[in-house]
C-alpha cells in the first residue's frame, strides 16, 4: 500500500502576516487615542451638559431626562437593546423593563402593542416616566421597585434588562444605573428573583459590555439555574457590547 502524503497546511505569506500585524497595532493605537480624547475632552463636557434636565427625541418619542437618570442618547447600551427589541414580535406580549431609567424602551414597546410594566429603584426616574408616558400617550404600569421586590407575582413573556455594570456600592439615585455593589450583589438578587417571573417560553434579554465582570455574572446565573447565551455582538472604536439571552438550564 502506497504512502499517503499529506498536503502541507497553507499559512499566509510572511508579507501578509506583517500587514495584518501592522493593521492590528494601528487599530489598537487608534482605539487608545480615541478613548484618551473621550476621557479628557468629551466626558467632562458631557457631565456638564447632563447636569440639567434635557429633552431627548427618538423617532417620534420625546422625553425629558433629569440629571439623576441614565441618558439613553449618549451611551450605546440602551439603543443597542432597543434595536434588538425592534425585531421582536411585541404585539400583545407582556413586557417588563427591569430598571427602566428614562423609560425609552418601555414607551417604545408600548407603542408596538406590548403590555408593558416598567420598574426602577430610582424615585426620580419613576416620577419622570409617569410624566413622559402621559406626554407620549403610552399606557404603562409603572412601579418603583428594587429589582423584583415590589412587582406583583406574575410571569412575563419578555423581560429587558440594561443592568448596572461596575463593582461599587451605589450612593445616589444615579449611581444605581451604574454600580452593581462591591461584589455584584445586583446580579445575585436578579437571578434569585427571576425564576418567579418567567415561564417556559419567556424571552429574557440583557445587554452587557466588555468592561464588566462577565464571568462573575455568568457564574451567578448558573448558581441560580440560568445560562447566558450571547446572541449579538456590537463593536465600535470605544467598546464592545453584547446582548445575552438568559435561559433556564434544562
Image (cartoon, rainbow, N blue to C red):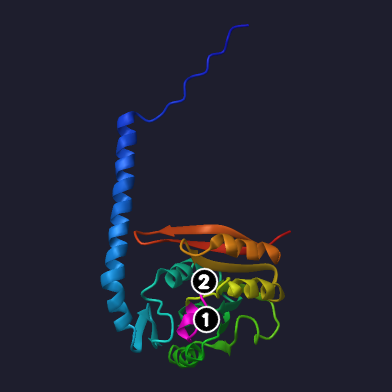
Residue 136 in percent (x, y) is at: 44, 88
Residue 216 in percent (x, y) is at: 59, 63
Residue placed at 31% from the left, 36% from the top? Answer: 18
Residue placed at 40% from the left, 86% from the top? Answer: 63
Q: Earlier in the sequence, mark 2 or mark 1?
A: 1
Work out which quarter of the rendered image holds the C terminus and state it: bottom right
Q: Secondary structure at mark 2?
A: loop
Q: Is residue 86 left or right of residue 250?
A: left
Q: Is residue 185 left or right of residue 105?
A: right
Q: How many marks?
A: 2
Disc 2 packing (10 Å; few <14; some 14–19; many ≥20):
some
Is 11 magenta? The answer is no
The residue at which mark 1 appears reads as: 110
Q: In this picture, which residue range is highlighted in magenta? A: 164-177
Find residue 193 and report its image quarter.
Answer: bottom right
Which SS does the magenta portion mostly show? loop
Q: Secondary structure at mark 1?
A: helix
Disc 1 packing (10 Å; few <14; some 14–19; many ≥20):
many
Q: CA distance from mark 2 to mark 1?
A: 32 Å
Q: Is residue 72 left or right of residue 91?
A: left
The residue at which mark 2 appears reads as: 167
Amino acid at each position: 500500500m502506497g504512502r499517503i502524503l499529506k498536503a502541507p497546511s497553507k499559512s499566509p505569506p510572511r508579507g501578509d502576516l506583517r500587514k495584518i500585524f501592522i493593521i492590528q497595532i494601528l487599530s489598537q493605537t487608534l482605539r487608545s487615542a480615541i478613548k484618551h480624547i473621550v476621557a479628557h475632552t468629551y466626558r467632562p463636557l458631557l457631565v456638564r451638559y447632563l447636569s440639567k434636565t434635557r429633552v431627548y427625541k427618538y423617532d417620534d418619542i420625546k422625553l425629558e431626562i433629569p440629571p439623576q437618570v441614565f441618558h439613553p442618547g449618549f451611551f450605546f447600551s440602551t439603543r443597542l437593546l432597543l434595536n434588538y427589541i425592534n425585531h421582536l414580535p411585541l404585539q400583545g406580549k407582556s413586557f417588563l423593563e427591569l430598571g427602566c431609567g428614562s423609560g425609552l424602551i418601555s414607551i417604545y414597546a408600548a407603542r408596538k402593542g406590548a403590555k408593558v410594566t416598567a420598574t426602577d429603584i430610582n424615585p426620580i426616574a419613576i416620577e419622570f416616566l409617569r410624566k413622559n408616558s402621559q406626554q407620549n400617550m403610552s399606557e404603562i404600569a409603572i412601579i418603583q421597585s428594587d429589582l423584583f421586590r415590589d412587582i406583583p407575582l406574575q410571569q412575563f413573556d419578555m423581560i429587558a434588562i440594561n443592568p448596572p455594570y461596575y463593582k461599587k456600592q451605589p450612593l445616589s439615585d444615579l449611581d444605581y444605573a451604574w454600580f452593581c455593589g462591591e461584589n455584584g450583589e445586583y446580579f445575585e438578587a436578579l437571578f434569585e428573583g427571576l425564576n418567579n417571573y418567567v415561564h417556559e417560553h419567556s424571552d429574557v434579554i440583557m445587554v452587557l459590555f466588555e468592561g464588566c465582570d462577565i464571568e462573575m455574572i455568568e457564574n451567578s446565573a448558573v448558581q441560580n439555574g440560568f445560562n447566558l447565551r450571547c446572541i449579538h455582538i456590537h463593536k465600535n472604536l470605544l467598546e464592545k457590547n453584547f446582548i445575552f439571552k438568559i435561559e433556564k438550564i434544562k
